[in-house]
Amino acid sequence: MLNMIVGIKWVPDTADVKFDPVKGTLIREGVESIINPPDLNAIELALSIKEKYGGKVYVISMSPPAALKGLKMAIAMGADKAILLTDRRFAGADTLATSYTLAMAIRKIGSYDIIIFGEETIDSATGHIGPEVGEILGISHISYIKRILNIDLTSKIIELEREVEDGVEVYRSKLPIVVSVGVGINSPRYPIPIRRLYTEVETEKYIEIWDLNNIEADPNKIGLQGSPTRVIKIVAAPMVQRRMEIFQYSSEVLNLLIKRLKECEIL
Amino acid sequence: MIAQREHFIMVPEWAILVLYISIILSLIFTMYGIYHKFSIYGIRNFNFLSTLRRKTGFILQSELRLLRERYGGLMHTLIVAGLVVLAIGTFLVFFEYDILMKINPNYRILTGSIYLAYEFILDLAGLLLIIGLVMAITRRTIFKPSRLENRVEDIVVLLLLLYGGLSGFILEGLRIAAKGLQYNQLSFIGYILSIAFLNINGIAEMYLAIWISHAITLAVTLPLFIYSKLRHFPLFFISPPYSVYEFKPSFSLNEVLKSKKIDFKVGLESIDALNWGQRVNIDACVNCGRCRDVCPAYRANKILSPKAVIQKLREFMAKNICNAITDSALHENEIWACTTCGECVVTCPIFINPLNYILESRRYLVTNLGKVPTNALFNIMVRGNPYGLPRSDRRNWMKDLNVSYAKEGEEVEVILWVGCAGAYDSRAQKIAKSLVSLLNKLNIKFAVLREEECCGELARRLGDEILFQEIVGRNIEIFRKYKFKQIVTLCPHCYNTFRNDYSDFNIKLNVKSHVELIYDLIANGRIKTFSPLNKTIVYHDPCYLRNYNGVLVEPRKIIKSIPELKIVETSKHFCCGGGGGGNWIESEGVRINVQRLEDIAMKNPDVIATACPYCVSMFEDALKFKDLEGKFEVKDLCEIVCGVLR
């Protein structure tokens, strides 16, 4: 029996988020939110481990109440229980404060073997949370893992593959462990419709809502107060206009190409 | 002397007793069969009389469906006509002898000219029956169409009926030879035979032997109308005439959310989920395979055959096997190979609906287990379109066009429902643009909906009834916000779902396909003339216009109203392969769209016209696959019309 905890984030669908270059802010109005895409892969990984080795899958998210929708979807995919950490005092957190809050909640859940995160979120793309939670809990953490090779349930040892640029690294580690996964390591399953309806009708049976009081965290380490990071300004990266010409190959064209490249001071 | 039926001539008392005993045994056996069948069907909320009445009106339609295949249709018509007349004839004899004459020996019906007509008609009926049976036996033994399997019952039924017919004629011939009845030329077959029998010895013994065998044949045939495939005859009249729209919601999402109680079952989990009508319907299947021959998936060597679906369900029902259907009777690939074209449903002469059981199985698989072989549903759930493209890109197609959004409180003539294909697919965007330019040119006030997202069609065909009802709820709210005369769609899938699926949710939408709109515009004179187009065209019917909504004539009339444009028809309609999720599900082996393209290419047209963005994309893919790009143009009818509009 393994206890798995998956951390997910309910994020605005960034494909729909437009940047207001005048005000220097993101236009989030009318933008629907989604489960952060690699978090779906994290849920899928947890569910597939559960199917193979047995266990329970908890899903956890620190967010305003709107994230309930995402947690319901995670339950519909097959997670056993979800916890929504929601408290005004959690607001304004940077990755450190968020990781601390999540780590405290995970500690509160008590028993955990594998903690899984998506590698990074599409709305802030830091990739911090997984490793930071691992550090705070004082357990191993491995990011960008590709697949689980084996889990020995008696000795509690996991073997897994980690994707690196020019190959694959194989690790063996003692449980518990924190891992993070990228989009594409697996295909997230479809949330079972009837389960989706059950979570809608009997939400409290599947989802618990926790606030600061539930997790015994240090109030100075959470929210804005616990966040050393300050966002000073957001600017849009200017789009570089690319030029393109297509040539039919011939020696003449080759010379033309060299000429053009020289004109652009590339050669 | 008046000509009249003489009963039991040349037959001794004991033989008559044999007849009565065997008939009584046969009736007991038949009654037991009926009882047994009804215990399988279970009688629940079934209005027997209304179905019988309704179904009688379907006889002609059934006959026309049979006659689509000339040989088989004619054969069946001859057999059924012969049998019905002979059955009535036999009943009249029984009625006269056993009822009327028992009341008063002088009460008769079969007398005088009625009797003479009776003799002639019955001989004719017997002849038709025998011709039909010989045709059937020839087909099963010599022509052997691949869709027909020769099971024992198929042969037994044919031979038994043939023996019944032949022995009847021989008896008549012997009777005439022995007794030389009056006006016997009217029994023309019997008369001809009697000439051959005139000089043989032992007519009386021969007559008796054949008479007894004829009686026993009759007694054996009767229960076959319950125990063999002949049951399709009585079942035809009591099984509901299922159409392509039979796929109904099995619960109401709104009520579930209100009552917070989930006490329903979704989909065809096991045969327990089949209702009375469905059971009768399935049991009526005679294994003729007409549905198999028109199935695009079967033609492309997929694992699916609608005939096999029904036959497997029938077997499960007969043996009362309650396993989950999708584990045992039907393979998942079988369920997903269906393009939901509905051709099997509109082909079946006894109105069986294989499509319904496939869709109900999908419902079971997806709604209860979440097993769906495509991301399209997830995309719809998350981003409101099956492509999974951003919501904000939905309006990109109309950036440079003169298109306005519907405003609350302002009535427009037409709401243009673009559909996900029209909005996102680069090829279908061109269709949407041409429709917009057509509407603009004709000064028709139209608007699109700012809130437009998926119509839910795909969710329903792929079996997620919950997602479908969520979408319906959302869209109905949107429709109620605005005032409009009609909704015009450019995708037949949206069209059908608004027209036939939404009607189960207390909303009646005045929805038209763009084909119907163009047809109306021509009919009411808003489009006056077209410039000539000197091309040859094949019009491929989108299944959701043809089979689901009968929009067959309109597109052809539009094409005919364009000067110089020639239309060629393919010999048979087949689906392009894009429906029922076909556009979204990868399948191995022969491609349905390529096969359909080959049908069309044989007619060598300049343009392949259709009226559905899925069909267009299916054919363009097929052209690429066959390396025929540039050889044929694939156009939506609307694009053609827009091009020749003056």
Image (cartoon, helix red, strand yellow):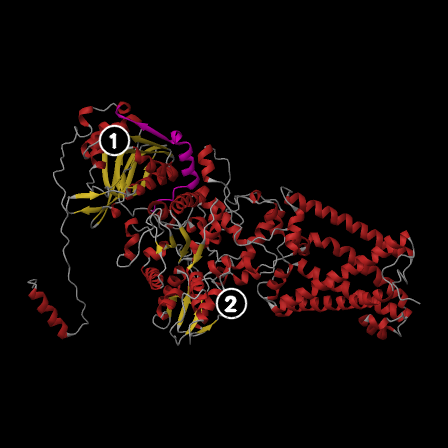
Residue A179 vertical position relative to residue A187 in the rendered view, above or below: above
Determine the residue positioned at 84% across, 51% down. Answer: B21
Residue B637 against residue A86 in the figure, above or below: below
> Please, is residue B4 above or below residue A225 in the view?
below
From the viewer's perspective, is the residue at label 1 or at label 2 nearer?
2
For mark 1, give the secondary structure: helix
Quadrant, the N terminus of chain A = top left
The secondary structure type at the circle numbered 2 is loop
User: According to the image, label 2 marks what residue?
Assistant: B572
Magenta region, residue range: A187-212
Residue B206: % across, % down: 87, 66
Disc 1 residue type (three-letter): Leu
In this rendering, would A33 be left or right of B323?
left
| Residue A207 sits inside the magenta stretch | yes
Location of mark 1 (residue) = A102
Q: Position of residue B81 (x, y in %)?
A: 71, 63
Graded by Cα atoms within 10 Å as few (under 14), some (14 to 19) or many (20 or more), the crowding at tag 1 reads many
Chain letter for mark 1, please.
Answer: A
Q: Is residue B337 left or right of residue A159?
A: right
